[in-house]
Amino acid sequence: ELGAKNHDMMAAVQGNHQRSRRASLSTLRLGILLVTSFLFGLAVCSAFFLWRLYNHDALLSDSHLPHYHNVASAKAGFTKGKTELQPPSSTSSSSPTSILEGLKILVTIASFDFMQLPHLEEVLDGIRDLCYAGSKVDIVIYTTVVYPVAFIDMFNDRMRCNNPSPNAGLTTTMMLKPNHVRLHLVDYHRQLFYDRIDQYDVFIYTEDDIRISPTTVAAYLHETNRVESIVGSQHATDFNVGIVRYEYDFPENVVITDKTRHATENVTRVYWEHLGKPIFEKAVDKVEDEALSPYYMSMHLHHQGMYLATASLLKAWKDRENCKFDEIRDRPSNPKKPSQPTEGTQRVWMSSQMLYGGRHCGVKQLLPVENFGQLTVLHLPNKNYRRVGKQGRIGGSDNAPKNEFSDGTEVFQRSHPLLLKALELHVEMKKEFPNLQKSNIGEGGQYTGVRVVDTDVKKHHFTKDHKAAFEKRLNAYKDYVSRGGYLIESDMDLDVEGWTMEA
């Protein structure tokens, strides 16, 4: 009987222990469930608030971003009279990080002499930035003058692109032409484009006073791809994405100094070539193509002073009816007076009129409404807006004020002699650091700096003095290259004030 009681007591204890274990496990499970539920709820709430923040905060929302950040240049569908661009497809991680990465670009510049040198320097700075954006760029400058070696050495330092990408690079070549070609200096780029048509992706021709940036080229490519996605590759050759030049309308009667700096308060960009109101009747044209008209417009006056083109467009324009874009020819003129142009000068003809003129190639200039500002470029002289409204100029009448031209009697006040000039500093740096003599030497010990090519120059056209100066500078350049592209004492012995006069 006692044993039975002990057995019952042991059974009760074991039952209590099992019930206690089950209660502990249940409590543990409940605790885990509560913690998990709390964390899950916290995650859901956090995601919701982040979503709200992203979609309603103006700084984080993508609603204010340019069109191409959230809509791809994908194939377009034509539905109910309007074009709807489709969402972008996913891209692999190996895709280029920039539209400019690995792009091969040929840039040609017409720069007759030293008169626009300050502008040319700015143009070259902008083009160099294409290399830092990942492109492989070859620059060809057509000119009639030889730069002194010290200046070429300074150009070498400025134009050296230290982008480590194997897809990026930069070369600069100065192609010397005889000065009697005058306005026909603008012609030479065309044959080079077609000779190298299969070696580059993008071709740029420009005068030496238009600031081109990586944004200009990237925007051009984006819009060119977009046009093709909307109308198809064949019809896309009927169009080309253009640019518009601007200046700043500084007061005409004021020199900006510390005393007058407030005069810039109301200065703004102006498109001086495009006049007339209402604007969308006189200055800007709507595009007739039904698929493109919701997105693009064109300027009534399509002069640009430059143009960009892809290899495929250049090929199409070569075979286009009434175009023959590869053939260099004179601008249209009065049959009875050939010296009188009827559609602009030779530079207007080669940069714009041949391509966009209705009686010639008839390609339609397109400017994107959304990204218009990305395809506007600064006209560096910033002087042409002053012509507007003058006799013989845009907006001028016979009774308008005369447009004054130089007569050679002007005397200009030079800047203060204490100002440190770029070439002056460059020469002094080379004197102080004579150990730096390998900057322009590449792999294999070859010179990699600015090339000067004189194969087309007929020296018998020069005067005796000009020929002597030309040959002196050309020989100095050849010696500079042969020793590896560094300055010696004779190169640095030049008048930094008046070196252009020596040419």
Image (cartoon, grey):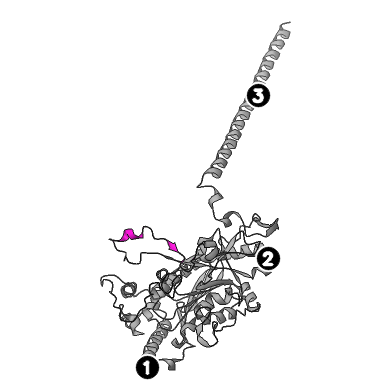
Residue 314 visible? The answer is: yes
Mark 2 residue element: loop
Foreground mark, 3 or 1, reads 1
Between the residue at mark 3 and the residue at mark 1, the CA separation in whole angstroms equals 108 Å
Residue 83, image x, y percentages = 66, 58
Which of the labelled discs sits on residue 232, or is there none?
2
In the picture, which quadrant includes the N terminus? top right
Amino acid type of the residue tagged 2 in the rendering: Gly
Between the residue at mark 2 and the residue at mark 1, the CA separation in whole angstroms equals 58 Å
Residue 93, image x, y percentages = 61, 57
- Quarter location, residue 409: bottom left
Q: Is residue 258 magenta?
A: yes
> What is the span of residues highlighted in magenta in the rendered image?
255-277
Q: Main secondary structure of the magenta part?
A: loop
Mark 3 residue element: helix
In the picture, which quadrant includes the C terminus? bottom left
Q: Are marks 3 and 1 in contact (CB under 8 Å)?
A: no
Q: Which residue is mark 1?
A: 464
Name the residue at 52% across, 47% down. 60
Between the residue at mark 3 and the residue at mark 2, the CA separation in whole angstroms equals 68 Å
Q: Answer with mark 3 or mark 1, whichever residue precedes in sequence.
A: 3
**Is residue 458 found left or right of 149 in the rendered image?**
right
Q: Which residue is mark 3?
A: 26
